[in-house]
């Protein structure tokens, strides 16, 4: 991402650009496969009760491992780089000891969760009936193996990140979705267990691939330097508070699914489908950029270049708005069409599509704020304000539970999605002003000026698309034609208004996006 940083060598911007281009490309391929997986899942299981059970059973180990993964990866990156500056052998030795310890830890954690599976399902699936709970226990016991398989590869992710080996890091997840797709396509009579074994085998292949990639690139899996407990303490000191950022971004998904078990069968699956579609642009673009800039932000902080950090923050906000505001408009207008095209087949009927599209609209209202949590966590982590993330993560869960009880009472399953958007909005606005203070930004008037223009452009975009769709409907032209046409024309209107009323910062973002597409097309996968 070629950010216009003051007093910054062009090579740094070029490195960020190439890194984020590679990440975006392979993230998009992985997400295309993820959409294919969801399409096959919808065809096979629709919004059935047994899919609800699987989603809830899987969400516990998935969220648990995600919390540990992000925290440990964020902690090991700066520490490994620090150790490597002294000696590559020392860095590899300390990292290998940590790999052994984390693998043992996740093995114990997996065994503990296996033994506690009945209690876990009683808690996270408290709204299920007796049959669903029995199935949930059986699924949970198998899925605890996921904790060990994925946990064993967590530090592989961190080391690949530290070494800037982004190709291997973002090719690896493809093994999971590809394995599940193959299992679903070649029906072998496993019923709902097909998803369980798909996840487990795919995760095993991903972990093996990352380990082999590290080995091939020269990482030494040996321990010539004795075990040093201080190194473990250093990782824990950085990692534990980082759980807060992940509590904000991920734990609310588990909270939503737990509370959805109180609603009619299929509600959990509805939320899951809607969340996956809403999450697609975030994972492809925003998460890719935040992961790419993390090591560079850390370097800027270490060098004391606060002006560069303020610029990165400002342009990150504007870039998020520039991308997410029009996407939100399109999702609000065409959510049902999107869901029908992607998922309506087999067991996934029109009523399921309608319910999922309503939840998708409610999720999309918080798209900007959800996207911001990825950038926000990157900055607070680099600034070593990790305790703030932990406290705010706890606050976000409390807010989400309260909003869930309120909104689901009035709106049902879509109220849970609306609650998540409201929670993200409150937390993100709070975070923006906290980060403004920590970075020493005197005011955000220039940034807000750009947002006023983006909102104006989005209003015109929304009206244009709505008018086109209505006119085409009056002329009896099918939505298969009117929707793509309206989306294209309205998007061009958005860009046109942005161009006419652009600020200097918006002009920079347009240039960034243009350069990004060029870098993406010409990315070298290394």
Image: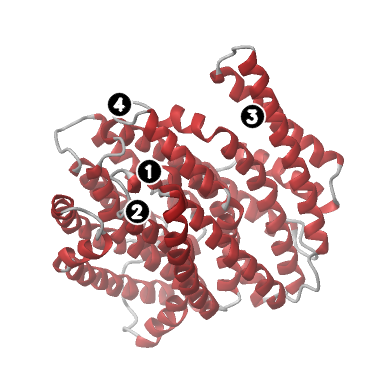
Q: Determine whether label 1 and label 2 are within 8 Å by CB.
A: yes
Name the residue nearer the viewer: 55 or 383: 55
Q: Determine whether label 1 and label 4 are within 8 Å by CB.
A: no
Q: Is residue 277 left or right of residue 468?
A: left
Image position of 462 with respect to 470: above or below: below
Kindly identify the residue that appears in the image at 55 percent across and 78 percent down.
Answer: 388
Earlier-in-chain disc, 3 versus 2: 2
Rendered image: mark on residue 260: 2
3D distance between C-alphas at marks 1 and 4: 15 Å
Earlier-in-chain disc, 1 versus 3: 1
What kind of element bears circle 4?
loop
- Residue 221 drawn at (x, y percent): 32, 67
Rendered image: mark on residue 7: none
Earlier-in-chain disc, 2 versus 4: 2
Image position of 301 with respect to 471: above or below: below
Tell which tag, 3 or 2, sits nearer the viewer: 2
Rendered image: mark on residue 346: 4
Earlier-in-chain disc, 1 versus 2: 2
Q: Determine whether label 3 and label 4 are within 8 Å by CB.
A: no
Q: Is residue 345 left or right of residue 135?
A: right
Earlier-in-chain disc, 3 versus 4: 4
Disc 3 designates what residue? 487
Kindly identify the residue that appears in the image at 26 percent across and 39 percent down.
Answer: 48
Identify the image quadrant of residue 293. bottom right
Tell which tag, 1 or 3, sits nearer the viewer: 1
3D distance between C-alphas at marks 3 and 2: 32 Å
Name the residue nearer the viewer: 525 or 347: 347
Tell which tag, 2 or 4, sits nearer the viewer: 2
Disc 1 designates what residue? 270
Kindly identify the residue that appears in the image at 30 percent across and 60 percent down.
Answer: 60
- Residue 281 drawn at (x, y percent): 54, 44
């Amino acid at each position: 991402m070629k950010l216009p940083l003051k007093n910054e060598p062009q090579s740094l911007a070029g490195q960020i650009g190439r890194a984020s281009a590679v990440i975006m490309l392979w993230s998009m391929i992985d997400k295309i496969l993820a959409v294919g997986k969801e399409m096959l899942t919808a065809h096979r299981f629709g919004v059935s009760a047994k899919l609800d059970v699987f989603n809830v059973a899987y969400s516990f180990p998935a969220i648990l491992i995600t919390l540990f993964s992000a925290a440990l990866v964020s902690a090991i990156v700066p520490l490994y780089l620090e150790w490597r500056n002294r000696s590559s052998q020392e860095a590899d030795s300390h990292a290998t000891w940590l790999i052994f310890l984390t693998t043992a830890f996740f093995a114990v954690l997996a065994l503990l969760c296996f033994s506690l599976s009945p209690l876990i399902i009683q808690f996270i699936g408290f709204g299920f009936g007796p049959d669903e709970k029995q199935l949930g226990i059986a699924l949970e016991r198998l899925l605890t193996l996921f904790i060990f398989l994925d946990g064993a590869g967590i530090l592989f992710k961190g080391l690949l990140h530290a070494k800037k080996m982004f190709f291997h890091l973002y090719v690896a997840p493809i093994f999971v979705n590809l394995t599940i797709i193959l299992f679903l396509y070649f029906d072998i009579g496993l019923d709902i267990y097909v998803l369980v074994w798909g996840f487990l085998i795919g995760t095993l292949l991903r972990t093996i691939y990352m380990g082999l990639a590290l080995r091939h690139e020269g990482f030494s899996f040996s321990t010539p330097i004795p075990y040093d407990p201080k190194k473990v303490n250093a990782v824990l000191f950085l990692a534990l508070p980082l759980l807060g950022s992940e509590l904000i971004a991920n734990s609310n998904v588990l909270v939503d699914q737990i509370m959805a078990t109180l609603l009619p069968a299929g509600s959990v699956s509805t939320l899951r489908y809607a969340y996956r579609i809403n999450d697609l642009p975030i994972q492809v673009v925003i998460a890719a950029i935040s992961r790419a800039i993390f090591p560079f932000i850390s370097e800027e902080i270490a060098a004391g270049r606060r002006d560069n950090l303020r610029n990165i923050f400002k342009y990150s906000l504007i870039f998020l708005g520039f991308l997410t505001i029009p996407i939100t408009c399109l999702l609000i207008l065409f959510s049902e069409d999107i869901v029908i095209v992607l998922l309506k087949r087999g067991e996934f009927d029109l009523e399921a599509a309608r319910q999922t599209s309503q939840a998708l609209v409610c999720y999309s209202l918080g798209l900007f704020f959800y996207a911001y949590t990825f950038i926000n966590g990157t900055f607070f982590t680099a600034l070593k304000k990790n305790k703030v993330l932990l406290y705010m993560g706890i606050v976000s869960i409390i807010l989400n539970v309260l909003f869930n009880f309120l909104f689901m009472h009035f709106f049902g399953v879509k109220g849970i999605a609306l609650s998540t958007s409201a929670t993200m909005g409150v937390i993100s606005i709070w975070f923006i002003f906290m980060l403004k203070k920590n970075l020493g930004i005197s005011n955000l008037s220039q940034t807000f000026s750009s947002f006023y223009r983006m909102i104006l452009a989005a209003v015109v975009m929304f009206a244009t698309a709505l008018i086109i769709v209505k006119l085409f409907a009056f002329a009896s032209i099918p939505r298969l034609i009117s929707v793509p046409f309206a989306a294209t024309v309205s998007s061009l209107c958005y860009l046109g208004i942005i161009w006419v009323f652009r600020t200097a910062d918006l002009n920079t973002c347009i240039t960034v996006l243009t350069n990004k597409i060029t870098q993406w097309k010409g990315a070298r996968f290394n």
